């Protein structure tokens, strides 16, 4: 299937116009920085596997990556230790519970199940090799940058806001540690995890990061291989199962693409072999997913006939 540039351009413009009118949801408030981001910002971008960029609205506004970072640390760790070790040490199943659930951990003997919930993401961060937090962090920042195709930066403002309020995540890290599923010093793992959530990206960056997965691991802008093609399906499967937390099933049912959201208001959808769609709009629903972002990404996917479960030609 070839998607014409005109069709993609039209779908992006239409999705932005239609979804700009959607209200509802509220900014995340448990991280002070996120509460202060203007709620009316709304950006949408598509990047194709051959590097074409389509955008609308605030697609160049830099926002906090938050939980979407979990995908790229997972990709890094999968490259380093292999998909089977990730499955054994972290897991590959949805939890059915909120992204920061302690109960999910307790129910499963301390195994996080998914690298895309906070517990699993902290466990994944603890698997990044390095003698110090700074050494681990350098590898994660480098991975985010290679996916985006340029140097991604930590926001000191976001990081400080998170590091001074992340008590719940610290509790999760100690629970992991006591169950044997935190593979470094737990406070170091939370420190590194918190930094990875505190980088700034645009919707265009995010769509490029997703298009790197859509292309089987090659960044469409730099043409550099970022992750082995054989590892990509594991990442996309994790996104399908837990990318939108307790709404992951609804998202698969209605949109049919691997996705990932963040409490900063970003959302990513990946159409393997074709493109990635990224949206940014801060107000979230009760599951922690961008209200407008889900609608906009879903609109583009439907307009382009991109549904992983669709039968070609039907
Ligand atoms: O750990 C946290 O709570 C945040 N730094 C990230 C959470 C997040 O983005 C969940 N996503 N919807």
Image (tube, helix red, strand yellow):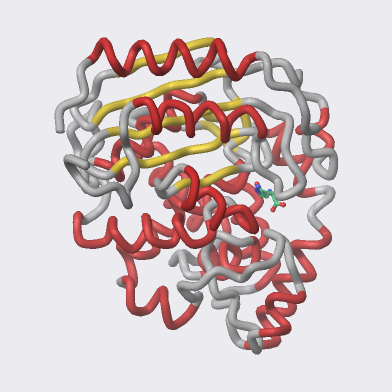
Q: Is residue 140 above or below residue 207?
A: below
Q: Residue at x 76, y 33 (%)?
A: 34
Q: Is residue 252 left or right of residue 7?
A: right
Q: Is residue 62 above or below residue 32?
A: above
Q: Position of residue 210 (x, y in %)?
A: 37, 39
Q: Name the quarter where the C terminus is drawn.
A: top left
Q: Position of residue 305 (x, y in %)?
A: 31, 33
Q: Position of residue 261 (x, y in %)?
A: 57, 43
Picture quadrant of residue 113: bottom right
Q: Is residue 302 above or below residue 93?
A: above
Q: Is residue 264 left or right of residue 279?
A: right
Q: Residue at x 33, y 78 (%)?
A: 84
Q: Residue at x 50, y 72 (%)?
A: 93
Q: Is residue 229 above or below residue 25?
A: below
Q: Is residue 163 left or right of residue 221?
A: right
- All told, the count of numbered labels is 0
Residue at the farthest front position: 314
Of residues 21 and 35, the one drawn nearer to the viewer in this rendering: 21
Picture quadrant of residue 33: top right
Picture quadrant of residue 171: bottom right
Q: Residue at x 54, y 77 (%)?
A: 183
Q: Name the quarter where the N terminus is drawn.
A: top left
């Amino acid at each position: 299937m070839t998607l014409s540039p005109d069709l993609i351009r039209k779908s992006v413009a239409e999705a932005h116009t239609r979804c700009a009118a959607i209200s509802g949801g509220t900014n995340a408030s448990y991280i002070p920085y996120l509460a202060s981001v203007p709620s009316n910002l709304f950006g949408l971008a598509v990047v194709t596997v051959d590097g074409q960029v389509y955008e609308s609205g605030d697609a160049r506004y830099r926002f906090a990556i938050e939980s979407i970072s979990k995908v790229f640390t997972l990709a890094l760790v999968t490259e380093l230790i292999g998909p089977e070790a990730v499955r054994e040490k972290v897991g590959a199943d949805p939890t059915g519970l909120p992204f920061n659930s302690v109960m999910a951990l307790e129910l499963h003997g301390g195994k996080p199940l998914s690298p895309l919930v906070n517990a699993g993401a902290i466990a994944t961060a603890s698997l990044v090799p390095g003698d110090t937090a700074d050494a681990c962090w350098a590898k994660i920042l480098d991975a985010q940058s290679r996916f985006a195709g340029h140097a991604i930066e930590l926001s000191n403002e976001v990081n400080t806001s998170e590091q001074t309020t992340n008590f719940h995540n610290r509790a999760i890290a100690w629970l992991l540690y006591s169950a044997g599923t935190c593979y470094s010093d737990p406070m170091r793992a939370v420190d590194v995890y918190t930094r990875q959530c505190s980088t700034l990206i645009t919707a265009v960056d995010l769509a490029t990061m997703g298009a790197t997965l859509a292309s089987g691991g090659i960044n469409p802008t730099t043409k550099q291989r970022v992750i082995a093609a054989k590892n990509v399906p594991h990442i996309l499967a994790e996104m399908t199962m837990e990318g939108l937390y307790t709404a992951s099933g609804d998202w698969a049912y209605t949109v049919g693409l691997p996705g990932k959201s963040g409490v900063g208001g970003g959302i990513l959808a990946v159409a393997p072999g074709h493109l990635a769609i990224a949206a940014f709009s801060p107000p979230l629903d009760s599951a922690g997913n961008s209200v407008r972002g889900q609608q906009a990404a879903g609109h583009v996917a439907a307009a382009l006939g991109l549904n992983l479960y669709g039968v070609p030609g039907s």
